[in-house]
Amino acid sequence: QSELDAANNLKDEKAGSEAEVDRARAELIHARHDLALAENDREALLHQCRELVRIREKQVQRSAEMQSVGFGSKLAINAAKRRLAASRYRVALAMGKPGEAVDQLILVVQRSTDDLAQVKRLHSEGASSTMELNRARYRATMAVLQLARTKGNPNVMIPHLRESIDLYHREHEQIKGLLQRGYADVVDEYIASGQLLNARLRQASIERDTSASQKQVEELIRQHQQMLTRLAGHRFEKEIRMLVEVALAHDRSRKSQFFRDGYLKDDLSLAEIEL
């Protein structure tokens, strides 16, 4: 909520945009969605899912308008459409409509595959980093994995998930090396570490390994707490602290739900396919 208030204030002062306000609104909806999921509040869950669809529809329209006047890119509008399909998947799932959920996930897989092809081309031309390529690969993997899970056959994707975990591990090690030499920021290392831990958590969740799931959730919480102390004096301390506190609250909520039910209920791969 604080992030959304800040975005609205910047917009009112002509220092921000409606796009930034919508991004903050989407983050708030995600947090409320996770809370409703943890509390098993189906009515609130469906409401948040529908609110997210409304935001994603606006973002698709905005991306199309930008492209029509020569701004934006095919990659940006494809990403907006991928997020819209992912949000519609949430609604179908909340309404108990597995057929519609599968249809939306097929669209997500198609958009993620298109994203990956475009990022590969940009990477070959030197216009995209290896990290961006790895993340596009991971999104595509998670989209296919989510489709397999929805169809009741998640195990076929475990080898691909392990490959993606290896990619994130190598990226994290690379950033740690750059940080030691003064070429990266503590925020870069925090993000890379979080991506690796969340990927490991997904594997543990899919494999129903409760011990590993508990370990990864607790490691995520510890990472957020350590980051809050590392931020002292950082040039963007206020802005980043807000994001870390949101992530900390989210993972504490996941931990509470895990201890209550013995497994993680939240749809772990959705965060990746919506990025």
Image: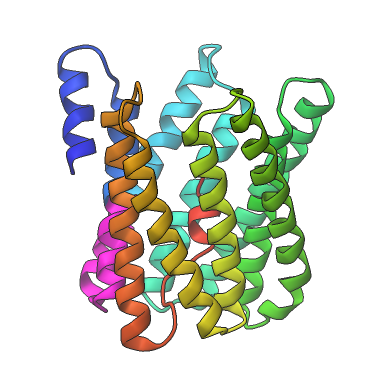
Kindly indicate the quadrant of the structure image that contains residue 202. Answer: bottom right
* 244 left or right of 131 in image: left
Query: Taking the image as drawn, is residue 110 in sight?
Result: no
Up-down relation of residue 180 to residue 42 (above or below): above
Residue 36 locus on image (x, y percent) = 25, 69
Q: Which secondary structure is most common in the magenta stretch?
A: helix
Residue reaching furthest right?
Answer: 124
Q: Is residue 47 magenta?
A: yes
Q: Nearer the viewer, residue 32 or 239?
A: 239
Q: Is residue 246 magenta?
A: no
Residue 32 locus on image (x, y percent): 25, 59
Q: Residue at x 69, y 59 (%)?
A: 165
Classify residue 200 as left or right of residue 271.
right
Image: magenta residue range:
29-52
**Residue 106 left/right relative to 55:** right
**What residue is shown at x 34% (from left), y 83% (from top)?**
259
Quadrant for the N terminus, please.
top left
> In front here: 169 or 127?
169
Residue depicted at 19% across the width and 29% down the height: 6
